[in-house]
Image (cartoon, rainbow, N blue to C red):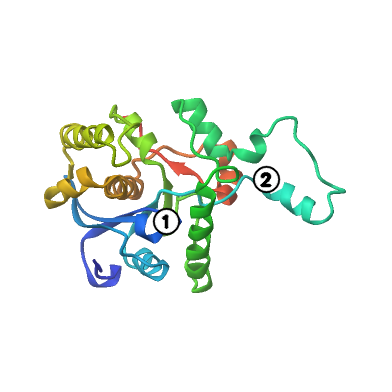
Amino acid sequence: MKPRSVATRSTVLSAGIDLSADPKKTGVAILEWAETGAIVTGLDVGRHSDGDLADLIGVVDKVGIDCPLGWPIAFVDYLIAHRAGGRDLVVPPTRHPLTNRATDLHLRETLRLQPLSVSADRIGAAAMRCAAILSGLTREGVEIDRTGRSGPVVEVYPAAALKLWGLPHQGYKGREPANARRRAELVQLTSAVLPWLELGEFAELCVDVDDALDAVLCAAIAGLALRGETEEIPEEHLAAAAVEGWIAVPTRA
């Protein structure tokens, strides 16, 4: 699944990476876009090394990564002060500044969703992998804008997009029969609610493996970001977003 580089093709491609700390659990999808919508042209799970993911970021127009692109500013400052001996350690009245980024708090306020904490939950391991991949690209001269407004990557969160689209956003992950049934229903509903997104031959894989479905959703959001169809970052959060990362969600319209 190696698309041609931007310089050698005329079509617009977006990709989605449902990133896990375990490469075997990492899903990757590629969408080809036209005026009327997008079609999935590639989808697999567990076949991409860190180098493969870096190469993919270099050849498509936009990549949506389901993983935090940074850590809370207050948390990083906390660790730095601790490493220095703790003399200048400032203990906040609550742990919220240490466990939540600005984008996490914004989603909780606007969508009643709570993303996993990159500083306190297991997703931190995936974020470490993501940071290593992106830092390698940075050393090669690739500009990584953690706000997602420019550059090749944007942080995404499929649950937020599903909720905005009025689709089920919980209970579809895992191999348990009930979860698999919910995933099958979600795939059917997605085809009805999002007629511009064509799963084609990969619909069955999306039903079978939740990492595949999430990768497709990541790629879809990335394409929408490229088309200017995601919400703007509030002005007061731009500085934090540039350091911590920002979750792009589709426009409510």
185 left or right, relative to 77 = left
Q: Tell whether label 2 touches label 1 (CB within 8 Å).
A: no
The residue that mark 1 highlights is 153
Dot 1 falls on a residue whose secondary structure is strand
Q: Is residue 22 above or below residue 108?
A: below
Is 29 or 170 nearer to us in this picture?
A: 170
Query: So how many labels did they put on this image?
Result: 2
Crowd tier of the residue under label 1, counting other residues whose Cα lies within 10 Å: few below 14, some 14–19, many 20 or above = many
Identified by mark 1, the residue type is Val
User: Which quarter shows the C terminus?
Assistant: top left
Q: Which mark is residue 75?
A: 2
Task: Give the percent coordinates (x, y) of residue 44.
Answer: 25, 58
Q: Residue at left 39%, top 38%?
A: 249
Q: CA distance from mark 1 to mark 2?
A: 23 Å
Q: Residue at left 42%, top 51%?
A: 154
Task: Give the percent coordinates (x, y) of residue 143.
Answer: 49, 64
35 left or right, relative to 174 = left
Closer to the chain start, of discs 1 and 2, is: 2
173 left or right, relative to 31 = right
Identified by mark 2, the residue type is Phe
Dot 2 falls on a residue whose secondary structure is helix
